Image (cartoon, rainbow, N blue to C red):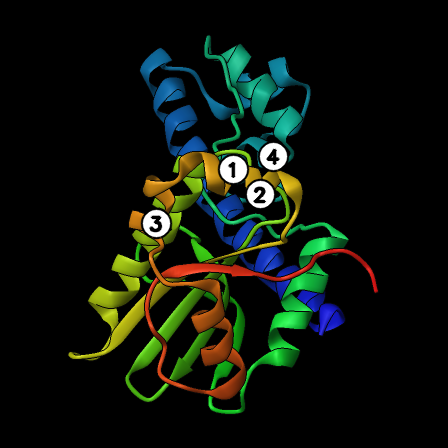
Amino acid sequence: MVRDDVARSRRVVERDAVRLARLDASRISQELRELRLGLNVTQAAVARVVGVSQSVISDLERGDPTVGLEIRRRAAIALGADLRVNVYPGATPMLHDAAHARMIDRLLKSRHRRWRAEVEARVPGPGRSSTDVRLSATGTIVLIEVETHLRRWEATARRCFENRERVREAAPTGSGVFAVLCLPPTRHHRRLVAELGEYVHTAFPESPDRLRRALQEGTDWPGDGILWIAGGPG
C-alpha cells in the first residue's frame, strides 16, 4: 500500500510541477516582453547583455518553460526588474513520516468491506487540497485526516471542516459527509484533547468507540469524531 501511495504521489507531483512551470513561464514571458517593449529595445540587445543568443530570448518570450531560471533572472535585471521566487503553503504535502503510513495502513486493514477507500483523495474546488483517506458507501462519505503529532488544533480542525463542506457541496443530494480526525493515542494527544474539553467535543462529538465500530463492522457512520489509531511499530 505504501509503495502504491509513493508512486501515486510522484505522479501528482510531476503532473502539477509541469503544469505550474508552464503557467509561470507564460506569465514571466509576458511581463518581460512588456518591459522590453516599454524600453524600446530589441531581443538582440537583451541577449547581448544577458550573454545568450537571441533565440534564447525569443524562446523565453514565447513562454518556453525549459529556459532556465538563471537566464530569466539575468533578463529581468537587464530590463530593470527583480525576479523573485516565493513558496506559498496551501496544498496537502506529499511527504509523510513512517508513523503516518502505518496509521493509514492499519486503518485500511481494519475497515469493513462495505467501505470503499481512496488514499490522498482530492477535495473539489481550487488548489490541490486532498484528504488522507476517503471512505465511501452508498449515501455516505467519510473524510479522514491522519495526524501523527498535532500541533495546531484550530488549523487542523478548520481544514477538516472546510474539506467536509467542499465535498458536501459536490456530493449527491442527501449524502452524509463526515469529518474524522485520526490520532495516535499518545500522552500529548490525550492531554491536548482533555485540555480543550468542550471545544473538542463540540467539533468532534461522536465517541471513538462508535467510530471504530462503524469502521470495523460496517454500521452506519455516526458522525464527526476523533478516531484513535496507534502510529508506532508493532
CA gap, disc 4 and disc 2: 55 Å
Please say if the residues under marks 2 and 1 sit with CB atoms less than 8 Å apart.
Answer: yes
Mark 2 nearby-residue class (10 Å; few <14, some 14–19, many ≥20) = some
Tell me the quadrant of the picture where the C terminus can be found. Answer: bottom right
Tell me the SS state at disc 1: helix
Q: Residues within 10 Å of mark 3 (few under 14, many from 20)?
A: some
Compared across the picture, whether 226 is left or right of 69 comes to left
Kindly indicate whether the residue at mark 3 contacts the one at mark 1 (C-beta within 8 angstroms): no
Q: Where, quadrant-wise, is the N terminus in this rendering?
A: bottom right
Q: Amino acid type of disc 2?
A: His
Task: Report the amino acid beneath label 1.
Answer: Leu
Contact (Cβ within 8 Å) of mark 2 with mark 3: no
User: What residue is at 67 percent from the left and 51 percent from the top?
Assistant: 96
Which residue bears the numbered disc 2?
189
Q: Does label 4 or label 2 sit earlier along the sequence? A: 4
Where is mark 1, residue-wise?
A: 192
181 is higher (above) or lower (below) than 61: below
Q: Residues within 10 Å of mark 4 (few under 14, many from 20)?
A: some
Instruction: For marks 2 and 1, give the CA distance.
Output: 5 Å
**Horizontal arrangement in the rendering, residue 138 relative to residue 53 (left or right):** left
Amino acid at the residue labelled 3: His
Residue 56, disc? 4
Count the numbered circles shown.
4
Q: Quadrant of residue 73?
A: top right
Q: Which residue is disc 3 drawn over?
A: 201
How far apart marks 1 and 3 lie (CA) works out to 12 Å
Q: Amino acid at mark 4?
A: Val
Asked whether residue 29 is in view, the answer is no
Contact check, label 1 and label 4, Cβ < 8 Å: no
